[in-house]
Amino acid sequence: MPKPAAVTRKTAVRGSRTGRPIMALLDLLGRRWTLRIFWELRDGPLTSRALRTACDDASPTVMQARLSELREAGLVESTRRGTWAYYSVKPETLAGLAAALTP
């Protein structure tokens, strides 16, 4: 599995002086609403509005920022169905996360 661009950057991230991929991943996962988004997408794709509702009406600005970051990192994908965009966790993401977090 190729390393997503946002997770392989070599610049410093919050809480670290290095840009090691694991530190970039932990920084992304530690941001507000990120883990909740993963939780809500566990059973399948959701629209942005359905995801906001599932996340207790989180701010649309914050939700879109997190979804953009997750898409950029290659952890979440967006597919169009008519006029709606559905977000889902990429199938290989959970296996990749488990492997990255295993000592």
Image: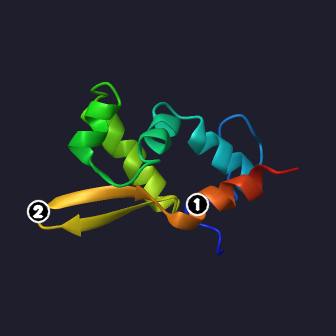
Looking at the rendered structure, which numbered label has been put on residue 93?
1
Mark 2–mark 1 Cα distance, whole angstroms, equals 26 Å
Q: Secondary structure at mark 2?
A: loop
Which residue is at 11% across, 62% downward? 83
Across and down, in percent, residue 9 comes to: 65, 60
Q: Secondary structure at mark 1?
A: helix
Q: Is residue 78 left or right of residue 80?
A: right
Across and down, in percent, residue 74 comes to: 51, 63
**Quadrant showing the N terminus:** bottom right
Across and down, in percent, residue 100 comes to: 75, 55
Across and down, in percent, residue 71 comes to: 43, 59
| Amino acid type, residue under disc 2 in the picture | Thr
Name the residue furthest front: 43
| Residue 59 drawn above or below residue 84 | above
Residue bearing the label numbered 2: 83
Q: Is residue 89 left or right of residue 55?
A: right
User: Would you identify the image quadrant in which residue 85 lies?
Assistant: bottom left
